[in-house]
Amino acid sequence: MVATRTPLMAGNWKMNFDHLQSIAFVQKLAWTLKDADHDYAKVEVAVFPPFTDLRSVQTVVDADKLDVVYGGQDLSQHDSGAYTGDISGAFLSKLGCSYALVGHSERRTIHGEDDATCNAKVQAALRHGLTPVLCVGETLEQREATENPAEVSIAQLIAGLEGVADDAELVIAYEPVWAIGTGRVATAEQAQEVCHALRGALAERFGEERAAQIRILYGGSVKPDNVASIMREPDIDGALVGGASLVIDDFAAIVRYREHVGA
Ligand SMILES: O=C[C@H](O)COP(=O)(O)O
């Protein structure tokens, strides 16, 4: 089946940039992309700032009509109430967010989020018109303990999507935990192997046609010099970028991956 998926390059800023820095960054990024002679209109560009930056990002994107979308790095599974420190999907939606990350490995590990919580957050995102970016991926220990490197990711995917409607807007991000922030990128073949298996699991869950429309991103030490080889793989539709998304020239080069030699 021929894929017609628009590539998505997503910058997860994690806990970096205050709201003033976020304005400067988004403006410069958009201008860097605009100034260059390239075809980035065919790539969707998203940033995931800290919650406290979102209103500023919204203001600058709207005022300057920038071709950048944005989302929350997390959201609450609840809509409102006594949940100190949590952020409702309703608030993200009101701020013009298109996406919400769900189940990033740092949320799973540091904040103890399990598959049931991730599933509740996926449902919360969808309730509020946000596209969840469901993050899955194995630790090094888990990878070494199995012959099937996709096993953990598929289990997380199936649990995370329980009860989700067949036509729900979704993005999946495969992020092997051992490749996040380590500089140890999965080879394009390793990433493709798991992303292909994930698409197979999506096909079993939603049918082949729907599975062929859902974008699957790779994340883990994506840089300008490795993005082209990753994007050549048939089941990889973009990247979820951490460290390199904080450097304008690097992130812009990732967005323009098609210009890289041999891409
Ligand atoms: O969300 C992004 C991932 O955690 C990847 O981070 P990284 O590009 O710094 O390895």
Image: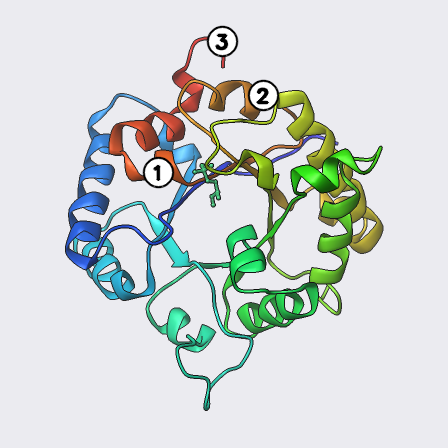
Badge 2 or badge 3: first in the primary sequence: 2
In space, the residues marked 3 and 1 are separated at their CA atoms by 22 Å
Residue 140 visible to an observer of this rendering: yes
Q: Which of 142 and 1 is in front in this view?
A: 142
- Secondary structure of the residue carrying tag 3 is loop
Q: Mark 3 points at which residue?
A: 262
Q: In this view, does 157 lie above or below 260?
A: below
**Does residue 123 appear to the left or right of 48 in the view shown?**
right
Ligand 1 under 8 Å from disc 2 Cβ: no
Q: Does the residue labelled 1 lie within 8 Å of ligand 1?
A: yes
Residue type marked 2: Arg
Between 165 and 233, the one nearer to me in the picture: 233
User: Dot 2 surroundings within 10 Å: few (below 14), some, or many (20 or more)?
Assistant: some
**Percent x, y of residue 112:** 59, 64
Circle 1 sits on which residue?
A: 245
**Nearer mark to the viewer, of 3 and 1:** 1
Of the residues shown, which amino acid type is indicated by label 1? Answer: Ser
Which residue is located at x 77 percent, y 57 percent?
Answer: 158
Neighbour tally class for label 3: few under 14, some 14-19, many 20 plus, Cα within 10 Å = few
Farthest top residue in view: 262
Q: Is mark 1 on a helix, strand or loop?
A: helix
Location of residue 147 by image quarter: top right
| Res 232 label | 2
